[in-house]
Amino acid sequence: MSGSPFDPLTVKVRWQTRLSRWRDALLRPLRPSRIKPERDGPPNLVLVGIDTLRADHLGLAGYGQPTSPCLDRLGGGGTIFADVTAPAPWTLPSFASALTGRMPGLHGGYLSGATRNMDTQPPGRLPDDLVTLSSHLKSLGYKTAAFYSNQFFAFGLAESFDHHLYVNRPAGEVARLANEWMRQNADGPFFCFVLLNDPHEPTTPETEDLAPFLPRLQAQGFATSDEAFRSYVRWGDEPGVDLTEAKFPADAATEQARAIKLAIYDGTIRYVDRVIGAIEDTLQERDLARNTVVSVFSDHGEEFLDHAAFAHQWGHDPRGINGIGHGHSHFQELLHVPWLAWGPGVPVGQLVRQPVSLLDLSPTLLAWLGLPPLPDLERAVASAGEWGANLIGKSVADDAVEPGRIILSEAIAYGPDLVAVRQDHLKLVAHRDGRILALFDLAADPGESRDLAAENPDAVELLSGHLAQWRQSGLGATGDQDGSWDDMDDTIRQRLKDLGYSD
């Protein structure tokens, strides 16, 4: 390939990026550096959220493609959580849970109703008085900033930072702006959140990051032309196969389309990985790494027809889409997400294999920073009783995760009110009212290909009991929420439409 196959589609973004860099270069002398590596006080925190990154596409999770050399190396110098469950299969509720330690039903960032469809129904916003990781750190004297490329982060999360900026540009530009803010604010403890959206549609990786995945396509005899790649910036444009209408069982054209889309997806991961490595390099060059905790995680994964058979069997997505994207199911390709960290206070060379939840992220980071826990978390646990401890999350900094812990996921964006209840290796997917969809044994069948509900009634009864207890607690994401996309600001609607969220 000469140049990037996506160049014709990214002209506007590339010019916007150049203009932004020229402007910032002119203004940089007026924005003095305030870097004090040897200052007193608690460590800094750099938290990188990667939208739409499934855990099993990283080398540190055993993936056989070269997607994540930087994260593999950096994670080895800190702590890697190998089995992390997202509390929701899409952006807003999952990021909100990670940064508040609460399930979606307790923070409000979700859709409601018997059947949800985010194409026509907006989610709720977080309440202004909800304590987030950023507002808590701000109260402890931290300067806080968020640089994000998904508008859903501004449904109550971004507003809790001192400074926040929406940047719908490639990861390198988002990181550059974050690095510049850190340069100007490193004279005291800071918390910088960076949300990189590149694995989310539209996917347009750099040529150098796509190249390692071309041999896999060529070995399968699939097309690697610029035109073929441009067809799958989203899920399929002419002359390619539209994967939103993929045939089942898949024919040869569908398999080729899926392979091309996967190569593009892997290329975006490699690009983001490279950018995260550069963020760490910048911290090292500025002598800030020794006093900065860095943590990387994802909000949810992505499905590439992994469970098309179940999707066609259940047929519950109101869009008529089966087995691609996210927000529509509770399979592991959406719920199993990466989380790793390194820096002062973080155990080195530790691999946590026990199942944990993204709810644990904020409590654990605060423990590693040596800071008080989220102030309202203890009150929330007390008010919810014993069950609430499982809903809210707790620190796992010492690899002391209790066996038998219940881990929950909810807040579907497309379809009926589905939930997942997991205990150890058993996972139940059901309607919240108790109607069973499937039971999986994640130890024997990590790909969730075999429904064991009929042959293991005892496990169904056990997990259904936990579901009933959760339902009776009233803590789930079930409350009615009125609203229409027409009530949203035009700018917000356009930003979300650019990401394929709403009509």
Image (spheres, grey):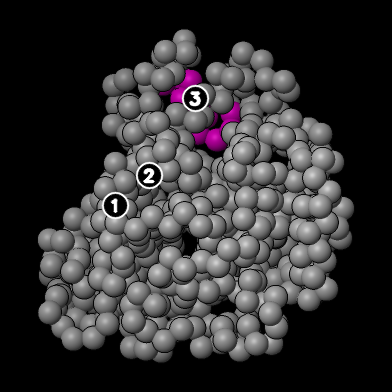
> Which residue is painted at 59% across and 51% down in the image?
335
How far from the left and from the top, in percent, is residue 449?
Answer: 68, 34
Say whether residue 30 is magenta: no
How far apart are the alpha carbons under marks 1 and 2? 9 Å
Q: Which residue bears the numbered disc 1?
A: 76
The answer to whether 359 is drawn above or below residue 171 in the figure is: below
- The amino acid sitting under disc 2 is Leu
How far from the left and from the top, in percent, is residue 222?
Answer: 48, 14
- Looking at the image, residue 228 sits to the left or right of residue 391; the answer is left
Magenta region, residue range = 226-236
> Which residue is painted at 73% across and 68% down in the image?
477
> Dot 3, crowdedness within 10 Å: few (<14), some or many (≥20)?
many
Q: Which residue bears the numbered disc 3?
A: 260
The answer to whether 392 is drawn above or below residue 271 in the figure is: below
Q: Is disc 3 placed on a helix, strand or loop?
A: helix
The answer to whether 198 is drawn above or below residue 184 in the figure is: above
> Which residue is painted at 44% across and 32% down in the image?
264
Q: Is disc 2 placed on a helix, strand or loop?
A: helix
Q: Which residue bears the numbered disc 2?
A: 60
How far from the left and from the top, in percent, is residue 354?
Answer: 51, 57
Q: Quadrant of residue 32?
A: bottom left
